[in-house]
Amino acid sequence: MKLLKSSILLISVILLTLVVGKANAFSRFSLQQIIKQDTTKKDTVKKTGKNNSSLDQKVEYKADDSVKMSADKNIVYLYGNARVIYGDFELDANYIEYNQKLNTIFAKGLKDPKTGRYTGRPIFKSGNDGTAIADSIFYNSETTKAKVYGVFSEQEGGFFSGGQSKKQIDDELHIKNVMYSTCNLPHPHFGLMISKGVVTEKQIITGPVYMIIEDIPTFLGLPFAFFPKQNKRTSGVILPTPGEDATRGFFLQNGGYYLGLNDYWDAKLMGSIYTNGSYETSVLSNYTKRYKYSGNINVSYASFKDGLEGTEAFANPTKNFSINWSHSQNANANPGTTFSASVRLVSTGRKGYYKNTAAGASYDINTIATNSTSSSVSYAKAYSNGMNFSLAASSDQTLSTRAISLRLPELTFNVPTFNPFSSKTSVGEQKWYQKITVGYSLQGTNRIDTFDSLLFQNDGLKRLRSGFSHSIPVNMSFTALKYLNFSLGGTYNEVWNFQSVNRRYTSYADNTYSFREDTVSGFKRAGSYSLSTSLSTKIYGRKDFNPQGKIQALRHVMTPNVSFSYSPDFTKAGAGPYRPAIDQNGRPIVITGVPLKYSIFDGMAQPGSFGGPNASIGFGLDNTVELKVRNKNDTTGTGSKKIPIIQGLSFNGSYNFLATSYKLSTIGFSGRSQFTDKLGINYNGTLDPYALTADTIPGSSLRIRQDRYFWQAGKFLPRLTNFGFSFDYSLNPEALKRKNEANDKLGDAANKKGLTDIQSEQLAAISRDPNAFVDFNIPWNFSFAYSFQYTNDGNTTNLSNTLTFNGDVNLTPKWKVTFQSGYDFKNNGLTPMNLGIYRDLHCWDMNVTWVPFGLYKSYTLTIKVKASILQDLKLSKRQGFYSTYR
């Protein structure tokens, strides 16, 4: 296997090295020609050379030391920082010799007799091409022949250095002992040595080719090679990665064929095979149309045999599939109309796609632990008058229970609020009736809630639920007494369902009952309405302190609001969607003195909002507290800044006059406090105003909630039933800033140029893993997040704590260690930890990813070239979490 892996590595290097871009590092000479310039007489006859360069082009030259000419003035000798400019061709060197008669240029550096260093090497540039450095060059402008010794030139992310290059009159390039590398040093750490070769416009033919690492020739080589040099997208073989798995045997992973179908569409056919009979296949296609749309489709299928031969797991392989489709439309393609898709469907099966395939071989723990997926395809159109329409199909999967919910499709139509009694030509202040606004919204749904194993059975479509809902809000708002904001309005809602339920009840002698529910096809409708008013204002308070002190002022803003809403009882049996529960004898079923009833829209597409009688007052209070403090950064001593101490601390509740019991609701509160510029805490909770009493059941120690307020039971404060707070903090916020900047740059590049496969993988990894972005300029970073949740129902108390942390540290300027984990307070232990070790090897990277314990225990060691054009030049060792018997 080692020999096979080495051979594949060699072939990958050569293919990616020589066919990525133009290997002719010196083809710029074919575009330039130095023309003879006679200074003794003027030739009015214009001669045009092979490359359409005319004789009247001016040749400029200079030198810091001296400029000498031969006796016949045909040869110019330039010494010391010499420079020659001819058109867009520029040449700098310590020594340049220009022969006007033979139309030749020779340039070289000089050896310092004191230090022995070779300095002043020729540096040449042509047009917009990059610069190149050589030991010496010779060029004939008339024949366009060129000869370069010891070149160092950058070409499309790679570097050519050393050897000899000779350009022939027919534009062929002959090379000898030239090294190609992605290392940007004149003396590279590694490279591919091309002993000799011929480069033409469409092909490269080489003699012996071999790899050199740290000046040591390796056995990785070929006696000869032939490569086509296409200047367009082409199809080709994708070489697999060999390896070994403890349970599935040896493998060839992610090999296949790339299809460059055209400039707008491509495809990759990929596969992996294992010696125990397991296999994976996938089809990935990217498509784009500039200024219109872009997207990709990925369909994967896997069949894995686990365990030992002869076991049930081996005889019955686990089969999984995954379908991913992403589509986005350019905002300028069709203004007002959008179409987008984000589809992610995976099989559940015995283990599930993510767990069985190691999240598509990404080994990402967060993805492996995914328990739900969602998909959507939507079309939307906005009209010039403000109305908008959308049509969407979506699904939600729960992988652990195999439950699936499909909405095929969902329809939404909205009419923005408008003033039906207002005139466009009216002037002055609006009349009260002109302030009335009306709106309309429509929602249609086709929904199936089932399990994936039942979805495609013969009766699968019988589970379809279809319906529409309509909503018409009417509102009027104005200002009363200058400071009070008052609104008055109401909403009418109506639902249409094309299925309803019919329940047949059976009562028993022990006062229990059961029922059978049937779904009945047919159109049914029901409506409801509500009326409401609201009143709000703002109250400002301020306390000033010593203006020269650290705290100068305290400001408190309160926003109280009061509302009243009314809606009649829509749960009466026989009115609206509710029906009485009648047993087999035609008698109503009564529970604790109250007749039982049910809604015919239970579980339907549009169940509606049909509640009991409601005449309630809602109340709320929002608070904001700010401190005005002296600004230490102000050198004048008079500057100040504001610090928000409490941001939006709100209390909300309601009182229903028509409720038969428990008229007062619970009091909810939430807010945020910003203690420093870097630390803020979010908190929320619920207060229950009702007291608890002992259960009347003999022998029970439980306490039950009673319709009695806490002050009536002698309590001073309401009972806190739940409370939670959370915060996150970074000890080195500069690290987070640099990471976000890197994400933004990669995202901008993706929007401008489109993502390559490796960029897509890198961007996804950075999004998933906070340690994936490694910046050696940040010496250290540590950040953590904590959340706390408390609940108490009067009998049991539950506490939950969640702590996660991640960070990194530079052991040396080239070594970095990253970590990501958390603490499980319930089990008193660390959550799965992810450790990373990175080593910057200049033109190479080494990284180790290690999950030291837990269900997903694994490690990966990779040494790879940094340059993306040699992305397959790497050595990798991986032990996956599934590589153990279990």
Image: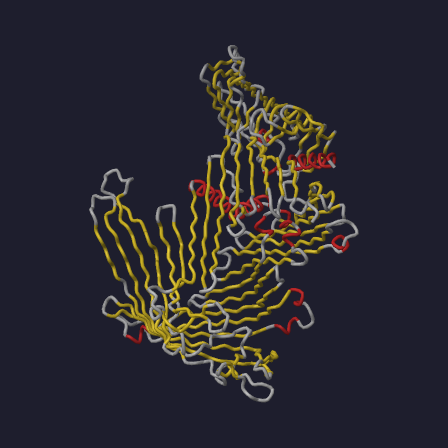
Image vertical order of residue 664 relative to residue 352, above or below: below
| Count of numbered labels shown in the rendering | 0
- Which of 868 and 242 lies nearest the eye of the viewer? 242
Residue at image point 57% right, 71% down:
446
> Is 685 or 117 nearer to us in this picture?
685
When the figure is inspected, residue 852 is found, relative to residue 439, above or below; the finding is above
Residue 268 in sight from this viewpoint: yes
Q: Name the image quarter holding residue 210.
A: top right
Q: Nearer the viewer, residue 398 or 36?
A: 398
Residue 64 found in image quarter: top left
Q: Position of residue 521 (x, y in %)?
A: 60, 80
Q: Looking at the picture, how far across and down is residue 351, in whole percent? A: 66, 55
Q: Residue at x 60, y 83 (%)?
A: 508
Q: Residue at x 52, y 69 (%)?
A: 411
Position in image of residue 867 (x %, y %): 58, 36
Residue 777: image location, x then y, percent? 47, 35
**Residue occupying the far right of the picture:** 310
Residue located farthest toward the front when viewing the structure as drawn: 699
399 vs 114: above or below: below
